[in-house]
Image: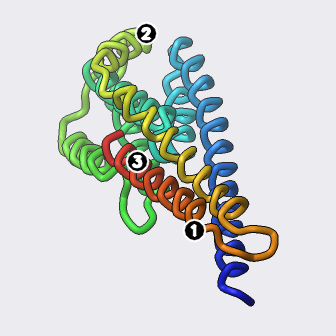
C-alpha cells in the first residue's frame, strides 16, 4: 500500500473515531440533562432523596466540560450543606456519599473530580464523629438552604465553553480535509491541502485540551 493510501486510511480512521466519540458524548450530554431535569423537579417538590439520586446520575454521565456534570455536583453539595445547616444529618451524609460515589464511579487513569471527592471524605469523617443532630427540620428549609448554597456560581465562562465547541469542530474539519481533500482519488498527496487539514486538527486539539482544563 502506498504512503498516500496509508495517509488517507489513517485520516479516515481518525475521523471515524472522532465521530464515534462525538456520538457517545452527545448521548452522555442528553442523558445527563434529562437526569438534571428530574433532579430539578424532585428538588422543587422537596424530595431530597430523589433530587440526590438524579443529580448523582447526571454527574456520572461524564463528558468533558458538560454543564450537567457541574450542576449535578453543585446540587449534591448544596443539599448536603443545606441539610446539615437545617439539622438533617442523615440527608447531609447521603449528599456527601452521593458526591463521593459519583467521583469514584467516573475515575479512570485519574480522578476527574478529586477536589469534590476530598471534600466529601472530609465531611463524612467529620459527621461520623459529630454528635447526633436534630432530624426534624422541614425539608423545605433544607431546600431553602440548598438554594442559598447554589447562589455562588462557579460555572465555566462562556469563552471557554465556546473554545471547547470550536476546538472540536476544527479537529473534526481538519481530519475531513486531510482524508478527503489532502489525497486525490489517484492516491496523490496534495501537500498544501494535507498541511492545512493537519494544522486545523492540531489547532482544534489544542483548543479542546485548553478549554477542558480551564472549564
* Distance between the alpha carbons at the discs numbered 3 and 1: 24 Å
Q: Name the image quarter holding the C terminus.
A: top left
The first of marks 3 and 1 along the sequence is 1
Front tag of 2 and 3: 3
**Which residue corresponds to mark 2?**
140
Task: From the image, state whether disc 3 or disc 1 is nearer to you.
Answer: 1
Residue at the image point whose x is 36% and y is 58% from the top:
111
Few, some or many residues within 10 Å of mark 1 (<14, 14–19, 20+)? few
Q: Which image quarter: residue 9? A: bottom right
Which percent across, then down, holds residue 17? 66, 63
Q: Is residue 57 above or below residue 135?
A: below
Given the current orientation, which residue lies at the most extreme right position?
Answer: 185
Position of residue 124 relative to residue 191, above or below, is: above
Question: Looking at the image, is 106 positioned above or below residue 139?
Answer: below
Q: Residue at x 81, y 69 (%)?
A: 185
How far apart are labels 2 and 1 at the CA level? 65 Å
Relative horizontal placement of residue 10, taking residue 96 as reference (left or right) = right
Q: Which label number is shown at residue 191?
A: 1
Q: Earlier in the sequence, mark 2 or mark 3?
A: 2
Residue with the mark numbered 3: 207
Q: Is residue 189 left or right of residue 215?
A: right
Q: Is residue 151 above or below residue 93?
A: above
Amino acid at each position: 500500500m502506498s504512503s498516500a493510501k496509508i495517509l488517507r486510511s489513517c485520516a479516515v480512521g481518525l475521523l471515524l473515531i472522532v465521530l464515534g466519540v462525538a456520538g457517545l458524548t452527545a448521548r452522555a450530554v442528553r442523558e445527563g440533562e434529562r437526569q438534571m431535569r428530574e433532579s430539578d423537579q424532585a428538588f422543587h417538590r422537596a424530595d431530597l432523596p430523589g433530587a440526590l439520586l438524579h443529580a448523582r446520575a447526571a454527574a456520572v454521565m461524564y463528558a468533558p466540560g458538560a454543564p450537567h456534570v457541574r450542576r449535578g455536583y453543585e446540587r449534591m453539595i448544596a443539599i448536603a450543606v443545606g441539610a446539615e445547616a437545617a439539622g438533617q444529618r442523615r440527608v447531609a451524609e447521603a449528599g456527601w456519599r452521593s458526591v463521593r460515589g459519583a467521583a469514584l464511579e467516573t475515575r479512570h487513569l485519574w480522578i476527574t473530580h478529586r477536589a469534590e471527592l476530598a471534600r466529601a471524605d472530609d465531611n463524612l469523617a467529620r459527621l461520623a464523629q459529630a454528635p447526633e443532630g436534630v432530624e426534624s427540620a422541614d425539608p423545605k428549609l433544607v431546600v431553602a438552604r440548598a438554594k442559598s448554597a447554589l447562589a455562588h456560581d462557579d460555572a465555566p465562562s462562556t469563552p471557554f465553553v465556546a473554545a471547547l465547541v470550536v476546538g472540536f469542530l476544527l479537529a473534526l474539519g481538519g481530519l475531513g480535509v486531510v482524508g478527503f481533500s489532502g489525497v486525490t482519488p489517484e492516491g496523490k498527496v496534495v501537500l498544501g491541502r494535507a498541511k492545512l487539514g493537519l494544522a486545523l486538527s492540531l489547532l482544534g486539539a489544542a483548543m479542546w485540551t485548553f478549554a477542558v482544563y480551564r472549564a
